[in-house]
Image (tube, rainbow, N blue to C red):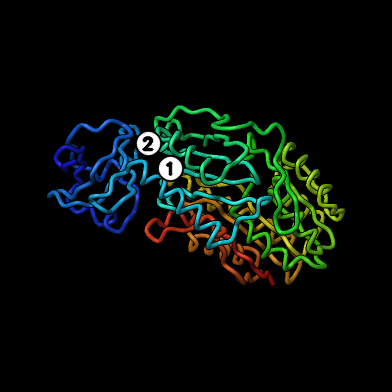
Amino acid sequence: MARSQEPQVYLKEGRARPFFGRHPWVFSGAIGRLAGDPADGDEVIVLTHDGHFVARGLFNSRSQIRVRLYSWQETERLDETFWRTAIASAIDLRERILGLHDPAGACRLVFSEGDGISGLVVDRYAGWLAVQFTSLALAMRRELVVDELVRRCRPQGIYLRTERGIGREEGLVLADGILWGATPEAPVTIAEDGLRFEVDIRSGQKTGFYLDQRENRRAAARFAPGRRALDGCCYTGAFAIALARAGAREVLGIDVSDSALEAARRHAALNRVENVRFDAGDVFQRLEHLADGGERFDLIVLDPPRFARSRRGLDQALHGYGSLNELAVRVLAPDGILVTCSCSGRVSREAFTEVLAGVTERTGRPIHVLEQRGQAPDHPVSASCPETAYLKCFICRVA
């Protein structure tokens, strides 16, 4: 098809550089004009203000991300072959390069922008797949996506999970439910580093489990032997149980969710660890209570939910991280280990480091960062899209 017959998006003058650099999001403010009257979900060609080819993408008039870019080859159409090849490439990275092919294990098979497939997330939990669509255009192509996943993975079932707020942001109407195959009637049991966990892919946080912290749980466990440990915001206990199994003297897990704690206790029984207990409560209040009571821990893990969902919430989020880490330092014994995390993409590593510097200033206790870690490699970071590097995990020694 000739270019003149395809819908075209012309960028404003001076706005093309990020997209030549393969950043995948064209926001509405970067667009000068449209040609060809594209419908939502249509393939479009993105051009500079004076008509030079930039990339191919999918259009959505209802989203602030007006075009998501996928190909920088002018003659490469975003057709069935393109999507099948892209999905196959993502799966190949996990199975052939990363070696994540344990049939009883779990991993992220497709990580949206990290795999060049903006708007699609696929997680594998043993024989089941959980799928999220975060773009209208990809959701419109879900039959093709499901067909390729079935062909490549041969799962027992594929379950759709929706993300809070995405319907409003994308003009997308979806509901959680089975996309293909059987519905898992009970939590799916997965294996991770010799431990077993039950994952409720129908109603758990995200798609059921925090796969992005896999290597960080392993790293934190190295410091566990002989230490008294606390896991704040423990969710279903993955960090806590990894610490307990690695030889911690005792482990206390805290979370505000009763249902998450019930799962955590089941996980402790499933893995036959008896040196761990789980208590319900707000982590800020519980840490303050522990500090006032003179309690001390040798190792503390902080993995709170995302504090900043937008740029407007950044200052409040940084204040929250500062308060939480300060409370943790108050109950951390001298020469203790602090494993502190932020999954807020709006919070940079530099800003998170400044948070810890503020904690040192207020407490008078030096904090030495031993390791700066990120998400597991099945959540690859795109060099062209720094927003994909969302997870920060600092392992620190607190004097």
> Percent position (x, y) of residue 158?
57, 36
Three-letter code, disc 2? Ala
Give the answer, above or below, for where 318 lies relative to 184.
below
* x and y percentages locating residue 257 in the rendered image: 71, 39
**Residue 222 spot, x, y in % from top left:** 72, 68
Toward the viewer: 300 or 267?
A: 267
**Which type of secondary structure does the marked residue at label 1 adopt?**
loop
Question: In the image, is 378 to the left or to the right of 239?
Answer: left
Disc number at residue 391?
Answer: none
The answer to whether the residue labelled 1 contacts the one labelled 2, judged by CB atoms less than 8 Å apart, is yes
Q: Residue furthest right?
A: 274
Q: Earlier in the sequence, mark 1 or mark 2?
A: 1
Quadrant of image for the N terminus: top left
Residue tagged 1: 119
Where residue 387 sits, quadrant-wise, is bottom left
Q: Residue at x 50, y 56 (%)?
A: 92
Percent coordinates x, y for residue 114 in the rendering: 45, 54
Quadrant showing the C terminus: bottom right
Q: Amino acid at mark 1?
A: Gly
Q: Is residue 391 above or below residue 41?
A: below
Q: Judging from the image, what secondary structure is the residue with disc 2 in?
A: helix
Residue at the image position 39 percent from the left and 56 percent from the top:
385
Q: Residues within 10 Å of mark 2 (few under 14, many from 20)?
A: many
Residue holding disc 2: 137
Residue ID at (82%, 67%): 226
Q: Is residue 204 above or below residue 337?
A: above
Q: Residues within 10 Å of mark 1 (few under 14, many from 20)?
A: some
Q: Nearer the viewer, residue 309 or 198?
A: 198
In 3D space, how far apart are the residues under numbered discs 1 and 2 (Cα atoms)? 8 Å
Using the rendered view, name the quadrant where residue 153 is placed.
top right
